Image (tube, grey):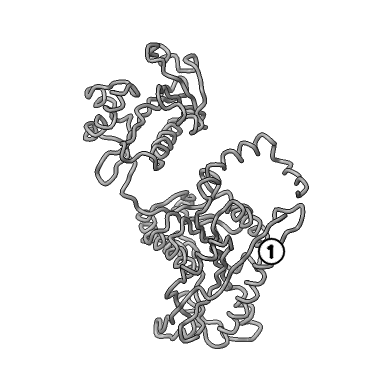
Amino acid sequence: MPTKLNAMPTTSPTSFVHWFRAAAPYIHAFRGKTFVLAFGGEVLSDGHFTRLAHDVNLLNSLGVRLVLVHGVRPQVETHLIERNAEIRYIDGLRVTDADALMCVKEAVGEVRVEIEALLSMGLPNSPMANADIRVASGNFVTARPLGVRLGVDLLHTGAVRKINVAAIRQRLDDNDIVLLSPLGYSPTGEIFNLSLEDVACATAQALGADKLIFLMETDGVQNSEGELLRSLNVTEAKQLLAHKEHLTEDVGYYLPCAISACEQGVRRVHLISRHTDGALLSELFTHNGVGTMLTPSRLETLRTANIDDVGGILALIHPLEEEGMLVRRSRERLEMEITRFIVLEHDGMLIGCAALYPFTDDNAGELACLAIHPDYRGQDRGDALLESIESAARQLHLSRLFVLTTHTAHWFIEHDFVNASVNDLPTQKQLLYNYQRRSKVFVKNII
């Protein structure tokens, strides 16, 4: 057994335990999932890969199926300078002549060996203690020449033609980490220099990866005011690219790839900074993350309810009222309170709803009428409604939510609500409490 590592002096046992418990749902959710992690050669040249190796080791130990895609641009530049060879780019793509191809092959060999060596560490009293990582690499990428661009022949610069999905999955099934370099091979035996983002995006699409993660120079995608955008969908991302004057250079490279990946079946794409120690773990295992997460456009949308939704909401809550799970609401009352509701819509059909009733004097809000259509339960839609209600409560500067329930106590406990009493309710709500229903009271701090 490894000896116990010293805790960080700024981390109390209580905060560590709280964080570890909060990370548990992500640990369960990620086991067996496939992540593609892409990073430039700067991570190696700057000496930061050791820290990244620690985090990769942790993900591997938690059962995440990992494909690493590395770049070599700074290493190739160094070799070209040493050879006094010409460095040429056309529209951001390297013109790979014979000298450049030789430098690419040398750089790929050096970087691949260094990555394999750092992933093989097993020093006691380190995050790699007892690590047993096997790295698989090979000719998994078939490529084709890009040809002539803007009147210039790019020579040995290529694009991905095909990913050998079966071979990669076999290595992942064997619990190996797959390492892909920015090289591709043709059926005629030619070698092509590929871009990091092309290999990563094509691989994630071919594997149907659960996540594609890019390590980049900036923290993520920012708006025109310089604010980090924590999440985007494909439509929003395309709008940003249409007015991309404020976007950084690497966002300009990676965001189109992220959009393409989402449109081709990748569930989540993350853009995070390579300069932040632990950014990978912080992005994956905390609710807010530290970068930008891109998701596909969905048929389902969460929105504020309007008067036209009254009929749909009544259809959702009536069966629950019949079962005694919800207090009965008349159409007239619902029409008066419709602005309190949010609805979840799937292709024009209301499949979920929830309501927030603020008690501003007590700095609290009541979560009410949380309902999901029976055909759409069990797919985290209740979580989405709860998250939206919490967000609305925070915007009103409320510090806690409370809920009264007769049937679903366990669900609320699983979502960080704690058992409370009638005396913990706002005074106005206490006066309205129905002692015949004997609803259980649960409270959750949200700030």
Q: Position of residue 393 (x, y in %)?
A: 43, 31
Q: Position of residue 345 (x, y in %)?
A: 29, 42
Q: How many marks?
A: 1
Q: Position of residue 200 (x, y in %)?
A: 49, 66
| Residue drawn where x is 78% and y is 47% of the image | 3
Image quadrant in which you'd find residue 306:
top left
Q: Element under label 1?
A: loop
Image quadrant in which you'd find residue 128:
bottom right
Mark 1, other Cα within 10 Å: few <14 / some 14–19 / many ≥20: some
Foreground residue among 417 and 306: 417
Foreground residue among 56 and 427: 56
| Residue drawn where x is 29% and y is 35% of the image | 305
Residue 342 can be seen in this image: no
Q: Is residue 17 above or below residue 96?
A: above
Foreground residue among 417 and 228: 417
| Residue drawn where x is 58% and y is 73% of the image | 72
Q: Is residue 336 left or right of residue 186?
A: left
Residue type at the position of mark 1 = Ser
Residue 428 can be seen in this image: yes
Residue under label 1, please give it: 120
Q: Residue furthest bottom?
A: 98
| Residue drawn where x is 44% and y is 53% of the image | 223
Q: Is residue 22 left or right of residue 257?
A: right
Image quadrant in which you'd find residue 379:
top left
Q: Position of residue 325 (x, y in %)?
A: 35, 24
